[in-house]
Image: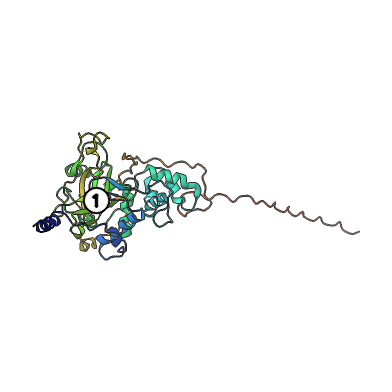
Amino acid sequence: MRLLLASLLTMLGSLALPAHAGDVCPQLRTQTAAPDPATRIAAVACNEHLLWYRPFIDRQGRLARAQVMEAEDTLLEDQATPAWQRVALYWRETGLLSRLGVGDTDSCLAAPLDPAMAPRCRSFVVDYAWSAAFVSWTMQRAGVPGFRLSASHMDYVRDAFRAPERSPFLPVDPALATPAQGDLLCHVRGSGDALGFTGLQRIAKGRDGLSMHCDIVVAANPGGDSTAYLVGGNVQQAVTMRLLPLNRKGAFWGLLQRNSGGAPCTPDNEAACNFNRQDWAVLLKLKPAAELARLQGTSSAPESTPTPPEHNDGDPVLPQAPVPSTGRCCVQCVVGGGVPRCPAAPSATPAPPAPVPETQAPPQP
């Protein structure tokens, strides 16, 4: 009788609890050349997550693993790339550095070859939020047509709202959405009033900027485990995975929303401490491959006035006038870096004296 009861309890438990498929990234990392754009997006994002030693936020909103952060000189998993240089690469390879008009961007163009520029580039990496640069780099590497590269999430969020026929994404209320591979889940940064989908939709119709963050959905409910796996850049200063629960229909389940008037996270208010509690405002649904094929390639040209980039504290940064030349120069220069080559150093060997012209001999008498 006890054996029968134990068997029944085991069966009920297996029905009630979701299966655990585990991290999908190790299997996805080799599929960067897949024919399906959604798979390519996930594969590129997964490769970066693995490169950063797989930090993640669990289903309870706890940072469960963090091995290296953006400003460190620690080598990533490839044992060749310092963490800060990888962030600089996201900026550099998307071409966004030259468009920012803020900060010491020249230093990150020159830093890979000019050690003298490294401290300035590392400072830039810390000061400016790079999550949009990471998303842009991922979309560029995955060859997603119609995506506009930008240093601000708000630009491609606004594209999806205002020009859905030209965007690779369609905006959906995350409270009603069923996430799928290749989608972007976005929240509004800051501690002010929560906007939600309706508030974001209103702002997207105008021209105002907005501090946001977007994560890339790399898998949804794999193996029936009722979990969405998302990867984002600049999440706790790294490329970090986020796990969010799904219901039986595949929609987000219990998606925690930031409470505008709620008490802050403090040691005596642990219930408010959850990295998954955000002002989740939109799920950008990736269009089917057939529809994407009709769009133009990725572009860095703005459809409208681009939103200013953000400091890492979430505040938008107003573009500044170009910094006057300070006499900086480089020895090992990068083409297009904007830093002039240093003049050649004088030779240590003294130059030979100029030849003295011979005097003409006087005529013979």
> Is the N terminus in the top left, top right, bottom left or bottom right quadrant?
bottom left
Nearest to the observer: residue 77 or residue 84: 77
Question: Mark 1 belongs to which amino acid?
Answer: Leu
Residue drawn at the location 31% of the way across and 40% of the way down: 314
Q: Which percent across, then down, holds residue 83?
A: 40, 50
Q: Which residue is under mark 1?
A: 243
Residue 45 lies in what quarter of the image?
bottom left
Residue 111 visible in the shown view: yes
272 displayed left or right of 362: left
Residue 222 lies in what quarter of the image?
bottom left
> Is the C terminus in the top left, top right, bottom left or bottom right quadrant?
bottom right
Q: Which percent across, then down, holds residue 88?
A: 40, 50
Q: Residues within 10 Å of mark 1 (few under 14, many from 20)?
A: many
Q: Which percent across, then down, holds residue 213?
A: 27, 46
**Total numbered badges shown on the rendered structure:** 1
Nearest to the observer: residue 19 or residue 250: 19
Label 1 element class: strand
Residue drawn at the location 39% of the way across and 40% of the way down: 320
Farthest residue in the front direction? 1
Q: Which percent across, then down, holds residue 73?
A: 44, 49
238 displayed left or right of 242: right
Residue 205 visible in the shown view: no
Residue 160, placed above or below residue 103: below
Nearest to the observer: residue 5 or residue 319: 5
Residue drawn at the location 55% of the way across and 49% of the way down: 342
Farthest residue in the left direction? 1
Nearest to the observer: residue 160 or residue 269: 269
Please say which color scheme the image uses: rainbow
Farthest residue in the right direction? 365
Residue 320, placed above or below residue 290: above
